[in-house]
Every structure is written in structure tokens, then in C-alpha cells.
Image (cartoon, rainbow, N blue to C red):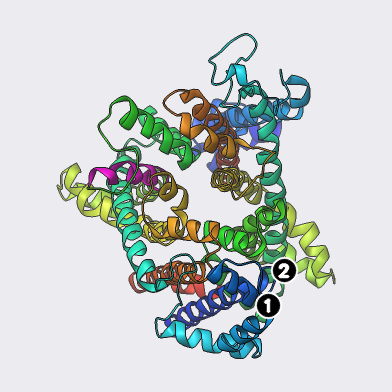
Amino acid sequence: MALLETTDGTPEGAVATPTEKTPGSLAQRRRSALPPSLLVGATLFALIVILLVLAPWLEPHPPAAQDITARLTAFSAEHPLGTDHLGRDVLSRLLDGGRFSMTIALITLIICAVTGTLVGFLAARLGGVLDTLVMRTTDVLIAFPEMVVALFLVAALGTSDLTLVLALCIGGWTPFCRLARIVAMEINGQDFIEAALALGCSTWFIIRRHVLPNALPPLLAHAALRFGHKLITVGALSYLGLGVQPPSSDWGAMLAEAVPYLDRAPLLVVAPGAAIFLAALSVTLVGRGLQIRQTRRDS
Amino acid sequence: MLYVLRRGAVLVATLLVASFLCFLLPYLTPGDPAARILRARVGDLEQDPQVLEQLKIEYGLDRPLVEQYLSWLGSAFRGDLGQSFTNGTEVLPQIVRALSVTTSITVLALVLALAVAVPLGAVAAVRHGSPLDAAITTVTQAFVAIPEYWLAPVLVLVFALQLGVLPSSGWQGPASLVLPCLTLALRPMSYFAQVARASMVEVLEAPYITAARSRGLSFAQTMMRHGVRNSMLPVLTLFAVWLAGLLGGSVTVEVIFAVPGVGRLMYDAVVNNDVPLIQGAIIAVVGLAVLITTLTDILYTAVNPTARVDHGTA
């Protein structure tokens, strides 16, 4: 603080705008404060995760328990969100179904992010033939829409959790790879990498100690944004009957089951859709917030 | 030129990978392909080994895999993708018909998205940092998180069941286009608006905007001649990306609204395990998608040569 004040008299300090002159001013506090979207998104996401983790204790009924006498009922004390066409408790099924969607989305996200980042870093670090090979591979893979890959895999391997994860991972690592590669190339051009090379550091050491920490913020923001995308795709595949298989269920499958009763019980469709929306929204907000924080730091 | 050649090579490689994987499809599934063809033909679980052997020779299933692939690829090139297992008709005409349906709803949806997104992005960029900008940004970000298989039933609930003004599904007349197109348009619209805004904020800070204003051009003229036009390139690139993606990505919407497009065709083919139809549809969709992205990339570098350097090292 004292140091900053003494530099006030220098020409740079003189032309600086008043907000930049005093530390702890509004502009600086804004810069260090968390962006509202990050705060809201993270809170919402934490809430959803807590609810899903505690699901077995929170569910008012077993999610698969049928009660044919109470089909398609509206809100009640016993069934806070009503019941579906088989008389199953909607709230319990929502809490239970979310566990599947979120787990699959998280697993595929981790696989894609780790693989893509590592391949991207290596391509940027080693360059040459490997780099070309990696880039052309991503070029080819990007041409395959996720849904087409999923349909192909279901045709070849049948429906299973493994098929679902594979479908989301085959092309899913490429955006991470491209981003990681671009960021790593920027970092590779800097002096401290040159210094590390001169000191005889290994490729692996440079990636771990220098590239990764510097590349992490943009990659994390990207991962959060992709998480929402994965959640929606998992739901879409389950909706089509290609994802989760009975007797398990998830939000997409619940939505599909509820569509025939759209006119009689619209809440059955609205509730699981809203769950997917809120979960996807929370991570999207986190991703945007991280991006905003990053640009603020850079500027 | 070199760039065009390289893009062409990627295009060919993509098609070869797609075709080889599609060719492998019947071999990847457990069980003998010949037995499966026979079962699909006669629907009989009791199979005569002699007929099976005959069928293998007839289909060339006794030859080496590579040889089979080349002959299969050859006939695919001549437009012979085989006959559908389920209805015995030629696969190619079915795919062409379905692709034309999908292309029309996709293009319509994306044009609609563009028509809404560009003015929205422009308004947000002009009022950069205002509450209106914040509202547009927040809403378009939230729209991205709306799954289309949720939006579709909700739109049906409102417009078909409650108001009764539009058909809930099917493919008769222009009215049945409205809900599928609206559903498909929402997410690309949000992305277009975000990109349009970001691109225009950058353009509006450029010196030539100030120059145009000081030359006496009105604000509206400046926006039309310089602002919108110069900020369109990233938006149009994204347009092409979505066009390529939605050809295979509109499966859920087509299934929900019973649109006879290529997504629905693929889905039905997978459900019925109709191998020739799956192969043909996937090759067609991937081929068209890679053609669109390749052309976009080439056009983009033609318009903006600096991108080539970026791509060359990138």
C-alpha cells in the first residue's frame, strides 16, 4: 500500500485515473470480487449436488414404488410433486434420476478434459508430426455429430452405460485438446519456458510445473460450459431410450415417459425438464463467471 | 492452394473413416452377419446351414474383409447403398428424401435464429454495459441451458393443447413446420446473439466507426454499413457450424414432432437394426456435414487470409 502511494508522484501515477490511484477503490474491489454469475451458478450447483448426494435420505418414497390407486395425482402432503402414470412419487424419482445424469456427465467430462488437455499439451510441446497427426484427427472427429456417434454405437454395441460414456467421449475430448493446445503454445512462447528448457527440465516437468498451472483457468471455464452440454446430451439419449435403461431412470427418461400424459399432468413433463435446465444453467453460469474473472485478471 | 488441398485431404479422410466404420457395423455386433441377414429375410430362427453357406458366398462374406470393404465402397460410390432390411426398398432414395426435409427445417430454423440474434446482439453491443445489455446477455446464456426435448413438449402444451393453433406433430403443410423450427432455433439463436454482440462491441471501438460518424453518417447508417457488416463474419462461420451439426443433431426434435427427416430415419433404423439404412444415413449426414465445414473454412480463409496463418500453425 505504502509503495503504491509513493509512486503516485511519478508521471504514470499522474495520468492514472483516480479510481486506479487508490487501492481498495470501487474498481479494484469489483475486480477482485466474484462475478455474480459465478456466485449464483456455484450456489445453485452446490445445492443440486447436496440434494442428489442426500437423495436416499430425502426421498419421501422409494423411487420405484408404484401405487396404482394414486396415478397422476397433483400436489399433496404425501406426494409433494404428485405422482406419475404408475403412481410413483415424482419428487423421489427426480432426486434419484438426477444421480444418474450427473454421474454420467461428470465421468465423461473428466475423461474428455484429462485426455484432451494432455494430448493438446503434448502436441503443443512436441510439435512436428505428432502435432499434425493430432490436429488432423480432431478435424476428422469434429465432423461426426455426437448424436450420430451415439446412434452408431448403439447399433453396434447395444445400449449400456459404457456405450453412453463412449458416445460422449469419442468426440468430446477434441474441444479440450484444441483449447489446451492453443493456450499451451502461447505459454510455450514465453521466456520462463526457455529458461526451464535451458536448465534441462523434461517435457513432462515443464507441462506439469509451468504449462498446466497457467492453462488451468481457461480450461476450467471451458469444462464448466461443456458440463451443461453433456448433461443435456445425456438427457437427450435417455429421452430417446438409448441412454439409461429400465428399471433405472433419469431426468431424460422421466420426461419421455411423461409426454403421453402432457395434457393431463403437465407438471410431469415440466419438473424433470426444469431439473435438467437448472443443473445445466448452474454450470453454464459458473463457466461464464470463470471466463469473466479471467478477462478481468488479464486486463 | 495448399490449404485447400489439405482441407480436401481431411474431407476424404473423414469420409473414409466414416465409411469404414459403417461398413464394419454388421461385423461389430455379436453373431454371424449372414445369419442375421437370413433372419431378417425369412424371420425364421431355424436356419438351414446350406442356405447360410450359399448366402455367405452370394454376399461375398467368405472373402477377406478388406476386399469386401472395397467392393462395398465401390457400390456405395455408384449410389448403391443396398436395400433396407425392414421394407426391402432402395436405401438411397429414402435418405435423399429425408435429407431434404431435414435441410429445409434446419435452414429455416437457423435463418430465423439469425434474424432474431443479429438485431439482439446489435442492440446489446450499442448499449454496451447497460442494464439492457446485461438482460440480453443473461437471457441468451440461460436459453443455452434449455434442452430441446423439454422445450418441444412445453411448446406443444401451449400452442397445440391449450391454444389449439398449431398441430402437435406430423408433417402436413407449413403450420407443422412452426414448432420444430422454433424448438431448433432457440439454442443457435442464443449462441449467434452472444457472438454477434461480442463481435460488434469490438467493431464499434474501431477507428473507422468514429471516422464514419465524423464524416456525418447518421448512427443508423454507420451501424448498417460498418457495424453489422463487419461483425457478421464470426456469426456466419458459426451459422455454418450449426448447419453442419444440426443435420445429425436434430434427432430428438424430429422424433418428438414426427418430422420425416434424416435424424428420425437414423433413429428408426437403429431401433429396427436396419443395417443398410444406418450405414447410408450416417455416411450421408457425415459427408454433408464435412462438406459444409470444409467449404466454410475455405471461404473463410478466402475472405480473411490472416486466418490461414492461424490455421496453418494451429
Disc 1 and disc 2 in contact, CB within 8 angstroms? yes
**Residue B242: % across, % down:** 41, 56
Q: Nearer the viewer, residue A174 or B183?
A: B183
The quadrant of the picture occupied by the C terminus of chain A is top right
The residue positioned 81% from the left and 66% from the top of the image is: A204
Q: Quadrant of residue A228?
A: top right
> Which segment did they paint magenta?
B174-189
Q: Is residue B238 visible?
A: yes
Number of other residues with Cα within 10 Å of mark 1, as a class: few under 14, some 14 to 19, many 20 or more: some
**Residue B279: % across, % down:** 51, 71
Protein chain holding label 2 = A
Element type at mark 2: helix
Q: Could you say which disc has been placed on residue A122 in the image?
A: 2
**Residue B264: % across, % down:** 44, 55
Instruction: Determine the CA span between mark 1 and mark 2.
Output: 8 Å
Q: Quadrant of residue A249?
A: top right
Protein chain holding label 1 = A
**Residue A103: % across, % down:** 71, 42
Q: Nearer the viewer, residue B213 or A98?
A: A98
The residue positioned 47% from the left and 68% from the top of the image is: B277
Q: Could you say which disc has been placed on residue A130 in the image?
A: 1
Would residue A188 be counted in the magenta stretch? no
Q: How many marks?
A: 2
